[in-house]
Amino acid sequence: MSTLAGWGRLPEPGTEVLDEDLERLTEDAALSRGLGRSYGDSSLPASATDKVAATRLASRIISFDPATGVMRAEAGLSLVNLVRWMLPRGWFPPVVPGTKYVTLGGMVASDIHGKNHHVEGCFGAHVRALRVRLADNTIVECTPAQHADLFYGCIGGMGLLGHILEVEFVLHRIPSQWIRMERERVHDIDAFLASLTRAAGTWPMTMGWIDCVHRGASMGRGVLMAGRWATAAEAPQTPPRAKADKVVPVEFPNWAVNPLTVGLFNTAYYWSHLRRVVSKLVSPEPFFFPLDSLLEWNKGYGSRGFTQYQCVVPRAAGAPAVREFMDRLTKLGGASPLCVIKDCGPEGKGTLSFPLEGTSIAVDMPVTPDTQRIVDGLNEFLISTGGRIYLTKDRFTRPDHFRAMEPRLPAFEALREKWDPARRLRSAQSRRLFGDKS
Amino acid sequence: MKVVVFGGTAGIGRAVAQQLAERGDVVCLLGRDALALTKSVADLTARHPSQASASMAVCDLEKPETFAPALDAADAALGGLDAVIVTAAMFATQDALESDVELTRRLTTANYANTVTFCEHARKRLLARGGGWLTVVSSVAGDRGRKPVAIYGSSKAGLSTYLEALDHKFREKGLWVLCVKPGFVKTGMTAGLKPPPFAGEADQVARDILRAMDRKKPLIYTPAIWALVMLIIRNLPRAVMRKIGF
């Protein structure tokens, strides 16, 4: 039986249909799927017989106005394709996620956030219009003024209100093709959170890597990164040289990522930043998309697959809550070579959009018999802080936990009732979390 | 460069046209569907200021009478031709072709007879202006008689042989003929087929094609690993080929 899987490589039965014509493709489809970079089950079908519309061949720009930066394009256009020609011409999307292997449709459906969330908000804040195929097969244009409820429902709506066919959004002019980056090695979680907040005040882009294995006094030690576009005056005249991507050639054995190797990796990575503070000009690609230079890195976790736990702990709960979260994570044994922390700005307008003012923490972990227990344990604590998880990464959250952390869920369910009363649009994730039928 | 891309609205051709446009080459698209052409021209126009002059002409691989007028229109729109790239082709599975003789006739005619005819029109125009590039997408399927691509592969085998001879004959006159042999590429053409190992993406194949043109190569396999795969397959004994399903 053929299967589809997200980036975490846990499969569900199903097949995708490819077509360059999105209108034809999305007719009677249950779900749209871009490049399949959501980690969990957001882009997987609720039932093996559901039509999954693979949008990635619909890659055309419909219009671009260099005077205003407004672009309209088909939903399957990838960020790789976009950045490839925009960067040399001095344009960049206002918000990008940590990988360029995503489509515009996916960026809207996940309402992706980036290193500049505390300044620019989510991608959805820069979207001006969407062309959407609804569950009843009609096609509508929605904007903040026209079908506004549908517009904001689709932003972060995980593709459950309609198939996104076209996206109109604003690009930003950039002063150069270089990033001025500052990197600081920080010795524990409290210092880290303080540095993160300080950096957010002066830098438009911030994020940090933390060691989530090490316990005791240096728990939560890590490397903080901040950046901004370099000015034309400080940047070199020549654009950065593109480096060739490498591919992970084979699936690693399942034991490759274990607490010991992760501990060694984390210590090595931490001390590879020998100088405490580094400031330099870097290429935007490794800055924004650090993992993209290693293609198919998800095979590193072996055949068992992996998941990412990403949540946001609200500012109101404060630094002690983040410290407590890190403490629980290390105690539960969520050993991970990748743990990313970031300051988020205010909540966006997307009905179910993820970010919330506070601290976002993302942790990769291999799937083991313990995963459900770890996720449950983290979720229970998260609910007590008033935080929430990011659906795009999720595979293991229980429906009652999600309901408890998401006061906006009734509003989203009301939107589904209005635009898709028969629940024809659905995913493996909506089956798991919202009780859709399979 | 002034480039004609026949089949440039979809698949490998679309990716080639987009990358040409991004680096500032001026493109004229040929294809059978006027609406698809209009949309693709708008896409190219957005990608680079030089593409304000991107143009189009209707041309159908199954209608050889459209070839000369379309190339003339492209020549006029571009103000001369430096390169002609052909990515248009038909595809059908061996099962579909075996159950439909008419489809077999159409596919072999389009992929061999008509493609060669189009190339002859293009070759004459390019030679008349002192040479240039003639780049044609053939297929690894033509390298060996194989069970799953008996008919499609034979149409590409004929095309590859023609392109090789063209290179031998006209290289010294300044005509750079490039025969592109893609392995499995995940496009609309192969939608519904299960991708084998080493399946490629259109963007990557397009990048390989443009690099090979810049280097004036006569033949490329893309993704590059297919050169090795086909080297092995070309050298397998018949007794082995008869046994395996590949």
Image: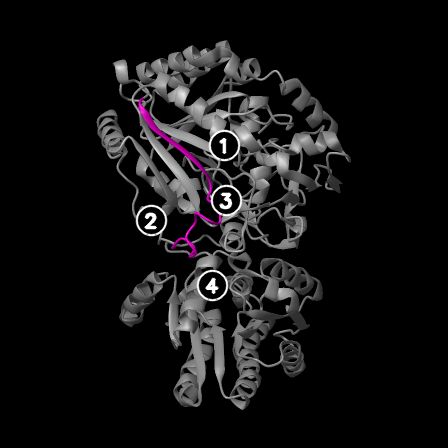
Q: Dot 4 surroundings within 10 Å: few (below 14), some, or many (20 or more)?
A: many
Determine contact: label 3, label 2, CB under 8 Å: no
Give, as a single range, the part of the protein colored magenta: A221-241
Q: Could you say which is closer to the camera, residue A185 or residue B115?
A: A185
Residue A288 placement: quadrant: top left
Asked whether the residues under marks 1 and 2 belong to the same chain, the reply is yes
Residue at label 2? A247
Q: Could you say which is closer to the camera, residue B17 or residue B234?
A: B17
Seen at 49% across and 32% down, the residue is: A41
Residue at label 4? B206
- Side of B7 relative to A194 (left or right): right
User: Mark 4 and mark 2: span between their CA atoms?
Assistant: 19 Å
Residue at label 1? A41
**What type of secondary structure mainly makes up the magenta span?**
loop
Q: Which of pointers 4 and 1 indicates the residue nearer the eye?
A: 4
Q: Indicate the secondary structure of the residue bearing disc 3.
A: loop
Q: Chain of mark 2?
A: A
Residue B163: % across, % down: 44, 81
Q: Indicate the secondary structure of the residue bearing disc 1.
A: loop
Q: Chain of mark 1?
A: A
Q: Tell me the tag on residue A35.
A: 3
Determine contact: label 1, label 2, CB under 8 Å: no
Q: Chain of mark 3?
A: A
Q: Chain of mark 4?
A: B
